[in-house]
Amino acid sequence: MSSEIRLAFAHPSERSEATALATPLDRISLRDHIVEVEIGAFQAERGVTQRICFNVVVEVQPLTGPIDDDVDRILSYDRVTEAIAYELSDERLNLLETLAERVAERILVEPQAMRVFVRIEKLDRGPGALGVEIVRARGSHSPPRDDDEQALQPELVYLSNAAISSPHLTGWIDQLTKGARPLIFCVGASDTTAPQINHRMAQRRIDLLAIEQNAWVLASKDDRCVVVATRTELDWAMKNGQSCVWAPSKIVLDAVDGPSAQPRDAVALAAWFASTFGAGEMLVIGAELPANASLPLRCISPDSPTL
């Protein structure tokens, strides 16, 4: 028991050694790699950065034949730090557990990597270090997520309030759902003015929630439209042919490189969202186009029955 407790708090390299597999493996390690990042589920952790510390050990298949001092033959330390940097830049995360899983998954894509120990600790949330540690082995992880995301090219459509209330709405959805691409609708706030307060962050949340209220209005008009708030929900819906209405709060607030567009600039905000999918264009029905959208926009009148 004392040995188990010691290993629980030991460096991942000691855990790796103590749980070595029958076939000897080499190890590379990253110790005390500290990064400042915004992460955390609590409101006090939003809008601020904190230090998190990474300790990673990767067990790799021993090389056969001479190394010849050739960096291309080994798993470089840079691949470990790049995996961390990639996952931190991909989106804002609430949980260290999620971050650890994603870092481990990305490292195990490397052909030399057989098993990985990932320990991540928050250094600024209390008098001690608060963290998680996971162990993952080759074969226990999913394929890289970005390959899946690249395969999904949704049709992004912005609907104005005039479009939402148009008698042509059902016909438009009929036309759009006949295509091969998954369908995501974006909307702005309703014509009813949201509460106005003198607090920038709180006002932003209120304006995002106003958009989400209108998303539910659209969903009430056609059962094929389902309101979704997370990339996980969106990915599942797209893979299963479900039409979505984007509820923006979580994705906007969790974005590492968030949109410059404010929620009141709803078309520009939707264009930013469309660009995160690599969309070639976005269809806009019944709204004025912003001057500097992040991708091409195609506009039609809410009086047109055909797209």
Image (cartoon, rainbow, N blue to C red):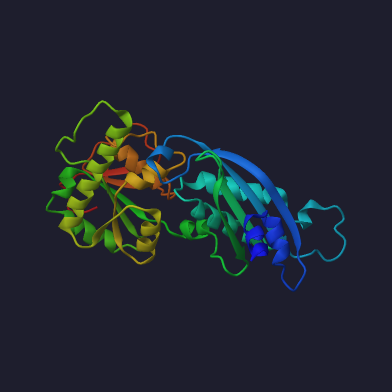
Do we see residue 117 in this rendering?
yes
Q: Residue furthest bottom?
A: 22
Identity of the residue drawn at 40% across and 38% down: 44
Please identify the residue farthest to the top as the structure is shown.
198
Q: Residue furthest front?
A: 2
Rendered-image quadrant of the N terminus: bottom right
Residue 140 versus residue 232: which sits nearer the camera? 140
> Where's residue 11, x and y in %?
68, 53
In-image side of 89 versus 200 (left or right): right
| Position above or below: 147 against 36 | below
Which residue appears at 56% of the width and 47% of the height? 121
Question: Is residue 75 among what the camera can see?
Answer: no
Q: Nearer the viewer, residue 251 or 8?
A: 8
Taking depth in this image into account, of 84 and 275 the one nearest to the observer is 84
Going by the image, does 69 lie left or right of 99? right
Q: What x and y, as percent, mark residue 58? A: 69, 58
**Against 82, is 294 above or below?**
above
Image coords of residue 139 (percent x, y): 60, 70
Instruction: Locate residue 129, reporting x and y percent.
Output: 56, 45
Question: Between 58 and 73, which is closer to the camera in this rendering?
Answer: 58
In-image side of 27 versus 129 (left or right):
right
Find the residue positioned furthest to the left: 167
